Amino acid sequence: MKRNIAVFTGTRAEYGLLYWLMKDIQASERLALQVIVSGMHLSPEFGETWKGIEADGFAIDAKVEMLLSSDSDVGVVKSMGLGTLGFADTLDRLRPDILIVLGDRFEALAIVQAALIMKIPVAHLHGGEITEGAYDDAIRHAITKMAYFHFVATQPYRQRVIQMGESPERVFNVGAVGLDHLLRSPRMTRDELSESLEFDLNSPFLLVTYHPVTMLEEDPRQSFNALLSALDQFPEHKIILTYPNADNGGRAIIPLLEEYAQCAPERVKAIPSLGFRRYLSAVALADVVVGNSSSGIIEVPAFGVPTVNIGARQAGRLASASVINCTPDIRSIEDAIRRALSTAFASVCKEAVNPYGAGNAAHRIVDVLERFDGAYHKSFHDLS
């Protein structure tokens, strides 16, 4: 009998990280893959990215609508409530032996709390990390306490999960699962990427993704406008702008982003979702990755490409020497981009060590899942 492993995904970025793990579960002789899709994937506003999941060869076992078209904290909370209702029915129908979730999103919290009550063991990826500028930080730690297996990205993160009372026998340092793409995913050439985006990339370009800072920032438009003004200081560079996540405040950014692209269509390309293959291809070809996405901290350094990390959203995460931190104002962002573009910093990026592993996480996770004997009991692990 194969063990049913349900993988949950609610955003484009999270799915891109999970891709090779899903492929390895699919290929396992001892595991059967179930795919649960929700959140941004089902929203036309964010590109209906569930279609890309099916195009990649995955059968979607459940689509759970939960995302309200709202830009408020109340809207996010109500979306979580809708999600919990839908996830209860989905988990009751699928009854997976293990549920896999990645990270710290409110969509993941909604399904994990349902799985906890329904006695479905949860395997959590990327626990133990800190992002002080977002409520995702507390969500991540809450999921850790509800999860049974923990697949963390670095040894300090493993120690932090154990510090939270999780048994060392169930906490595995496998590295960042998204880095598997480095070894296993073909990338597009510059011409192929240009053709796919219908956007000429024969000039140098910056890849930009900015999300609201949900714990510290009441109105993300001020900091996002500062970012756009800083980008104006680099007219020789083209810009690829990806949409923000569906956090409260995210929809306030989208009209500014779209207006910026419409005013300079030959220089700026705005796109709801690149998909992981185009995104990683763009990372490899970009002069600098700019914004406050976790990918700038975790995946981008592995390409030897500089990251300009804006503001406090990722504060607390381990970071490579190729990451330049700056404050969310025009002068600081501009200075950081200029430093990232310098010849001296290019040498730093080539020699920088990425603390998040070597790109073989998926195989290591599947090996643990295949050896799981079905026993499900947790005790608090006190540090001696």
Image: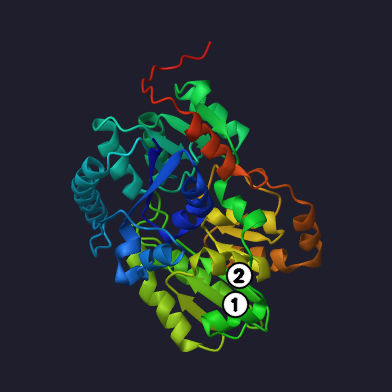
In the rendered structure, the answer to whether residue 363 lies left or right of residue 79 reads right
Q: Which residue is drawn at 81% across and 59% down?
A: 347
The amino acid type of the residue labelled 1 equals Leu
Could you say which quadrant of the image residue 114 lies in?
A: top left
Can you see residue 244? Answer: no
Q: Earlier in the sequence, mark 1 or mark 2?
A: 1
**Residue 269 x/y as whole percent:** 51, 80
Specify whether 128 is left or right of 245. right
- Who's the residue at 70% across and 64% down the image? 340
Q: In this view, does 81 lie to the left or right of 206?
A: left
Q: Which of 378 and 337 is in front in this view?
A: 378
Mark 1 touching mark 2, by CB under 8 A?
yes
Is any part of residue 98 visible from this angle? yes
| Front residue (pair 184, 216) | 184
Q: Where in the figure is residue 100, as x and y percent of width and height?
A: 41, 42
Residue 244 rendering spot, x and y as whole percentages: 42, 64
Q: Residue furthest top?
A: 384
Tag count = 2
Please tell me whether mark 2 sits on a helix, a strand or a loop.
Answer: helix
Q: Position of residue 92 (x, y in %)?
A: 21, 41
On screen, residue 56 above or below 361: below
Residue 230 tag number: none
Whether residue 273 is situated above or below residue 26 in the rendered picture: below
Judging from the image, what secondary structure is the residue with disc 1 in? helix
Most extreme residue toward the front is 1
Pair 1/2: label in front: 1
Residue 282's tag is 2
Is residue 374 placed above or below 11 in the rendered structure? above
Q: Which amino acid does label 2 sit on?
A: Ala
Q: Residues within 10 Å of mark 2 (few under 14, many from 20)?
A: many
Residue on which disc 1 sits: 193
Distance CA(mark 1)–CA(mark 2): 7 Å
